[in-house]
């Protein structure tokens, strides 16, 4: 990246860093089970709540306790279960129509990041009926309060129940973009590990590595605070200590609970300290090929950490020490490499591939341009890269060349 653009990016990031303490960040009110939501509904006098989910979650019976609670309390609960993984603008519009038709005053999402983000975007469209989602993309564009949103995660990955972010796919232009606004932070979150019991091993692995990516990207970025460094370290420790166990034994509720907490801490950390190029590149791959977010991140993470080089060795050594891979006496380089090797080891043991199938060379420039626009100037990455430099990251994870 040239000197002038670098200067612009760093100044922009410094301005956000200085503004962070006065920005209206808040945490959701937290509960341990769906049953505890009764008090919330009574307090709000809810008459009709739109439940946003996806077809698999509903089929797995994960929405049952919520629907039964609503029935018992005499609350109407229309369900939108059409959310796709990497949710689309169309999903949001379909669901918003139901919200209006059923005169809802509250939103609930049961699912992974896709259902929760879809619900955030529905809320945004409800309070900004004249703005398209395209017009809402970016940072700090929305100020009107969205309807109260209850987020009930069924994956331990995105931390969307605490983040101000919603990620949407515009299928028409194969572009995945983010909206980052404090009004999108859910009002309530339910952390019940039972909700993640049915998550299959491969998704347990990749969504868990998404949470690790949030923690690591927040930690190595240039906008950390004492609080976000602590949250990121706690998340990294929990993930190193539990993700493999949750992958091997999905019924281990201690491991599941620890992963839910890790995802929440990591989500909190990156909400204030941002993510980095792993996410910018992963989003472009999700938009272009619908590659699942967690999978793209898991594969990209070690490659991007290597690409940042010596600039992050000191920080990675701290993480290596935190998880017991180093004692701090080794050189920064040796300890950092151990941390990266450990990530590769986790990936390998959980059946995550080293490369991604389906990337076509001719699509790389456009995806790199999208990643450049998403990451620069917003993400306070340790080493700035322009579109040309980002292209190398796609090449690094291409599966033995191009798709035939
Ligand atoms: N808002 C944020 O801060 C944020 C952060 C990171 C990623 N994201 C976005 O979130 C989305 C990814 O979310 P995700 O990784 O949680 O996955 P997801 O919501 O896309 O779900 C992935 C698959 O897992 C299934 N699934 C989920 N929970 C299950 C369970 N308990 N049992 C059985 N199957 C289950 C779903 O039906 C789906 O098929 C992407 O669009 C990504 O860009 C958002
Ligand atoms: Fe993520």
Image: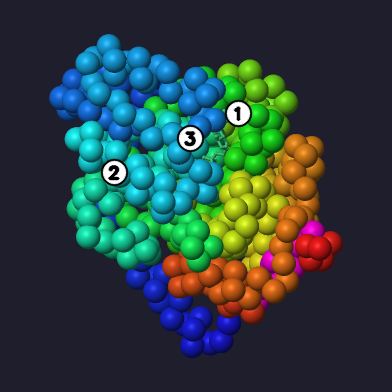
According to the picture, the residue beneath numbered tag 1 turns out to be: 199
Of the residues tagged 1 and 2, which is closer to the observer? 2
Disc 1 Cβ-to-ligand 1 distance below 8 Å: yes
Q: Which of the two marks, 3 or 1, is nearer to us in this view?
A: 3
- CB of mark 2 near ligand 1 (< 8 Å): no
Q: Earlier in the sequence, mark 2 or mark 3?
A: 3
Residue lying at the far top of the rendered structure: 72
Left or right of 90, for residue 253: right
Q: Which residue is mark 3?
A: 54
Check residue 390 for magenta coloring.
yes
Residue 194 horizontal/vertical position (percent): 52, 20
- Is 224 on the left-hand or right-hand side of 29? right
Q: Which residues are magenta?
A: 389-399
Residue 322 against residue 81 in the figure, above or below:
below
Give whichever of discs 1 and 2 has the lower sequence position.
Answer: 2
- Tell me the SS state at disc 3: loop
In this rendering, position of residue 390 left or right of residue 40: right
SS at badge 1: loop
Q: Residue at x 69, y 35 (%)?
A: 202
Task: Give the camera-side residue of 118 and 22.
Answer: 118
The residue tagged 2 is 97
Mark 2 is surrounded, within 10 Å at the Cα level, by few (under 14), some (14 to 19) or many (20 or more) other residues, namely: few
Q: Are marks 1 and 2 in contact (CB under 8 Å)?
A: no
């Amino acid at each position: 990246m040239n000197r002038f653009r670098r200067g612009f990016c760093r100044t922009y990031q410094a301005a956000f860093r200085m503004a962070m303490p006065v920005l209206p960040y808040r945490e959701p009110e937290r509960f341990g089970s769906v049953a505890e939501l009764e008090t919330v509904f009574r307090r709000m006098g809810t008459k009709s709540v739109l439940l946003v989910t996806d077809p698999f979650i509903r089929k797995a019976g994960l929405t049952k306790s919520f629907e039964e609670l609503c029935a018992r309390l005499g609350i109407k609960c229309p369900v939108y279960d059409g959310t796709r993984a990497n949710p689309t603008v169309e999903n949001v519009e379909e669901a918003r129509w139901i919200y209006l038709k059923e005169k809802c005053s509250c939103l609930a999402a049961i699912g992974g990041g896709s259902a929760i983000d879809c619900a955030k975007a529905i809320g945004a469209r409800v309070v900004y009926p004249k703005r398209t989602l395209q017009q809402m993309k970016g940072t700090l564009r929305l100020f009107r309060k969205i309807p109260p949103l209850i987020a009930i995660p069924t994956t331990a990955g995105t931390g969307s129940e605490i983040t101000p972010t919603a990620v949407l796919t515009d299928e028409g232009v194969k572009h995945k973009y983010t909206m980052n606004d404090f009004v999108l932070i859910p009002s309530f979150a339910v952390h019940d590990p039972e909700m993640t019991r049915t998550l299959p091993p491969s998704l347990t692995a990749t969504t868990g590595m998404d949470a690790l990516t949030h923690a690591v990207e927040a930690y190595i970025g240039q906008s950390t605070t004492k609080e976000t460094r602590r949250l990121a370290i706690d998340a990294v420790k929990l993930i190193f200590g539990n993700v493999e166990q949750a992958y091997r034994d999905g019924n281990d509720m201690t491991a599941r609970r620890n992963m839910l907490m890790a995802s929440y801490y990591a989500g909190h950390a990156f909400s204030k300290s941002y993510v980095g190029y792993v996410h910018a590149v992963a989003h472009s791959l999700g938009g272009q090929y619908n590659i699942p977010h967690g999978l793209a991140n898991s594969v990209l993470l070690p490659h991007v950490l290597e690409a940042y080089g010596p600039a992050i060795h000191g920080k990675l050594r701290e993480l290596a020490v935190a998880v017991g891979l180093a004692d701090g006496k080794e050189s920064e380089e040796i300890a950092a490499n151990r941390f990266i090797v450990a990530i590769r080891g986790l990936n390998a043991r959980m059946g995550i591939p080293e490369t991604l199938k389906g990337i076509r060379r001719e699509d790389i420039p456009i995806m790199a341009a999208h990643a450049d626009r998403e990451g620069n100037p917003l993400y306070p990455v340790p080493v700035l890269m322009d579109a040309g430099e980002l292209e190398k990251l796609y090449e690094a994870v291409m599966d033995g060349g191009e798709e035939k």
